[in-house]
Image (cartoon, rainbow, N blue to C red):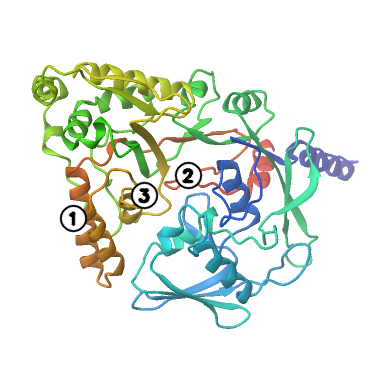
Amino acid sequence: MLALSLVLAGGCDREIGGAAKVAVIGPQPRLKDPAAEPLSTGDAVLLNNVAQGLVRFDAHGQIEPGLAERWTVSNDGLSYIFRLAAAEWPPGGKVNAHQVARILRRTVARSSLNPIKDTLGAVNEIVAMTDRVLEIRLDAPRPNLLQLLAQPEFALVRNGQGSGPFLLRDRRGPAGELWLRRSITGLDGEEEQHEDVWLSGAAAETAIERFLAQQADLVLGGTFADLPLVQAQRLPRRALVFDPAIGLFGLAPARAGGPLADAELRRLLSQSVDRAALAQALNVPGLLGRATLLEPGLIGVADPVPPQWTAVPLGERRPELIAAADRLFGAGERPLLRIRLPEGPAAELLLRRLAEDWALLGIRVERAARGVPADLRLIDAVAPSDSPAWYLRHFRCEAAPVCDPEADTLLEAARGASVPAQRGALLMEAARRMDEAQLFLPLSAPVRWSLVSRRIDGFAGNRFARHTLIGLEQRLVEARR
């Protein structure tokens, strides 16, 4: 009887544990070719888990083996050699290095629509050395290469399929949830086990409701825009988890003409923003205002030095800012600035904050309506690596309507620099010029949040805001026990 009761108890535990249920804020995830179109947040989660790259991120945002079981880097940093693990494409067929090389070459090709392909601009060749060995050759060292290869934009998709670690099964849930299954090889003759996850996309309100109703164990993909929706709820203790994300959060000119073509006005606007009040209103632990394009802690460059005006409290510098606006506009009419913003209550909060700060200069703001040209647009992007070049290349003349050609020249020189110190110096000078021209009005770091059930153990925020689904079911079952 005791043995029977233990068996039944184990069966109940498995039934209660079940599959982990994950909701991603946004449209329903789809398995896309990263070279064919940009990815939604849900697409990125799905690709990271069913179409792993050569490497992938663990729960803490650290690099671990993906399709490549190991790799070596040459002493000069110009060659990365990957040995592939034994793997198959569903429904069959072995993965080989020739296929992987073709997929990666297509992803970084000029015709690719991959939004971060430019980050691999130092790649010279991607070649298969044997069926199981692949080499990536660089024109200049890139110590952040593995971070980039772990991003979903470099997931390996062939004929609409990925190599895992999860497989996307044909069956769907009652609300269209995707069924992901991972096989776990037993040790010492143990029976093979399976890990299951149900993955779906949902609007922020719906995802939060599912979590509160215990119909979702994990909610991913929260941004600053929908943050007030979750902050208004009575949540279980430690359920709301913020990523210490790196990247860009601020405003950039949206068109070449108009009032924002004037660098003096851009500087006035940036210096008039009460970043501390904005950070306080968003109520994100540890969030600080930022006044430079680059942020501290990036690889290969010194931490940026805040501009001198940040040392003067905003209340003390406002009279000079108002006087500068009077000199700039004289008796003429002050501009109305239209800002392109996402939907969401925090976007309205940001608009109100900017309207209040800039009203002192006599400048009005409003949300840019659909189909109406905007003067400013919000950039809210998590960096794919800790390279400063990613930040700066957003504002090249090829990518931005207001730019500095001299900064472009510095960026191109940095791309080909083989000496890290020289590359760092060129990037720092480009950043200085961009900050001086105020090509970007920085506000803070990007905000990313998740909801994590107490039934899930070991979930961690990380600087790239990428979250693996591996191990969720096991952690969920153990927590329930």
Counting the numbered discs, the total is 3
Please state which of residues 416 and 72 is positioned toward the viewer in this rendering. 416
- Give the residue type that dot 1 points to: Glu
Residue 465's mark? 2
| Quadrant housing residue 429 | bottom left
Q: On the image, numbered disc 3 is attached to which residue?
A: 399
| Quadrant housing residue 73 | bottom left
- Mark 2: secondary structure: loop
Above or below for 379 versus 52: above
Q: Residue at x 34, y 18 (%)?
A: 352
Q: Is residue 255 left or right of residue 68?
A: left
- Give the residue type that dot 2 points to: Ala
Q: On the image, numbered disc 1 is attached to which residue?
A: 429
Q: Quadrant of the N terminus?
A: top right
- Badge 1 crowding class, 10 Å Cα cut-off, few under 14, some 14 to 19, many 20 or more, is some
Q: Is residue 106 left or right of residue 386?
A: right
Question: x and y percent of residue 142 in the render?
Answer: 36, 66
- Mark 1: secondary structure: helix
Please state which of residues 347 and 204 is positioned toward the viewer in this rendering. 347
Of marks 1 and 2, the one in the foreground: 1
Of marks 1 and 3, the one in the foreground: 3
- Mark 3: secondary structure: loop
Residue that lies at the very extreme toward the bottom in this rendered image: 130
